[in-house]
Image (cartoon, rainbow, N blue to C red):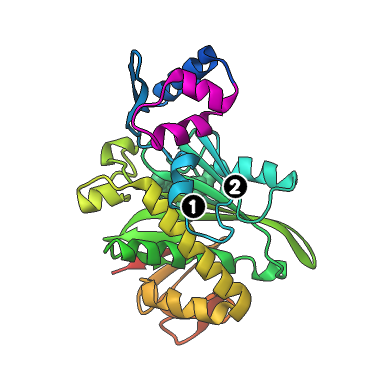
Amino acid sequence: MKDTILKFLKGADYISGEDLSKRLGISRTAVWKHVQSLKEQGYDIKSMPRKGYKLEGIPDLLDPVLIFEKLNTRFMGNKIYHHEAITSTNNKAKEIAEAGAPEGTVVLAEKQLQGRGRLGRTWESPAGGIWMSVILRPNIPPAKAHNITLVAACAVAKTLRQYNIPARIKWPNDILLNGKKVCGILTELKAEMDGVHYLVLGIGMNVNTEKEMYPPELKDKVSSLKIYTGQNLDRVELLCSFLKNLEEQYEIFLNEGVGKILETWKQHNITLNNHVQVRSGNEVYSGLAVNIDKNGGLIVKDENGNSKTFYSGEVTLQG
Ligand code: BT5
């Protein structure tokens, strides 16, 4: 109902309470209540006796009504769940994926109270970022599911390039800006031996967040698009561009295989040809990141000329 009221308000200069109540088949008091709740969410709605309501300003919210006006995808984001605050969008996405939510369903939150990184790490999610999860149901063997992280990283990098923001991908799941982390990806999977039930692609992007919003130990390690550009970005527009790029990269992956994705990944990465330290389980391995193999593994060559390929781990760029 709230969404429909907003659509009417957006399509008119003034619209009377009576007119709205007739069009929506609800009482004028009910209209008034919905308008109050929109105002509480930050919509600037003016009321004038005899003229009715007028929408004067839109809040900086990832409101699905605002997103659907700009979204130009085939299926990515066809269904959107938006929360003011939530523990973790990945948790919610898993819950609705279990209940059968279709591919392309998106869960968004203005804030996460228990945002998660990999291996139980915390993901700081203050207001102003884009904290989202996308449900995917690819018909691929589980062993290839980690490639979706590369697909998402390419989509993020391509989107930021469209904004002239030179973000670079650090294997496997970080997006860096001037060497600082601006976005992280957490891919979670429900699968059986021979097939993927669903995959939850969690993406956290520091958009309009400020340095002061992060804990002291992270302040010098994180960046945001606002810190980089010096201005607030339209998060709805950014999200729509990202979903479009994600759909494109995902379809390339499904139709043409990971090869094409790796080409894009190489164009946007900051890992290859760098000296790196890889932590994987208990192992710490140092060397030159020489290539990424056809399965998305990172090939590192040590000073003795021995090579090792990693499929998961933590990379520190050295020098
Ligand atoms: C990640 O983990 O980079 C994956 C982050 C995924 C977050 C999204 S938000 C939507 C969805 N819902 C969730 O609950 N999660 C996903 P990892 O590589 O483990 O990096 C975690 C580390 O990054 C932390 O230990 C911190 O050092 C650092 N960190 C925490 N919050 C950060 C932030 N907002 N920006 C940059 N770095 C951060």
Splitting the image into 4 quarters, where does residue 294 fall? bottom right
Disc 2 within 8 angstroms of ligand 1 (CB): no
Badge 1 marks a residue whose secondary structure is: strand
**Residues shaded magenta:** 1-25
In this orientation, does residue 97 appear?
yes
Residue on which the image places disc 2:
79
Dominant SS of magenta comes to helix
Give the answer, above or below, for where 293 lies relative to 248.
Answer: below
Name the quadrant of the C terminus. Answer: bottom left
Within-10-Å neighbours for mark 1: few <14, some 14–19, many 20+:
many
Residue in front for this viewpoint, 129 or 2: 2
What kind of residue is marked 2?
Lys
Q: Alpha-carbon distance for marks 2 and 1? A: 17 Å
**Point 52% across, 29% down: residue:** 2
Q: Which residue is mark 1?
A: 203
- The residue sitting at the right extreme is 193
Residue 23 percent across, percent down from the top left: 54, 27
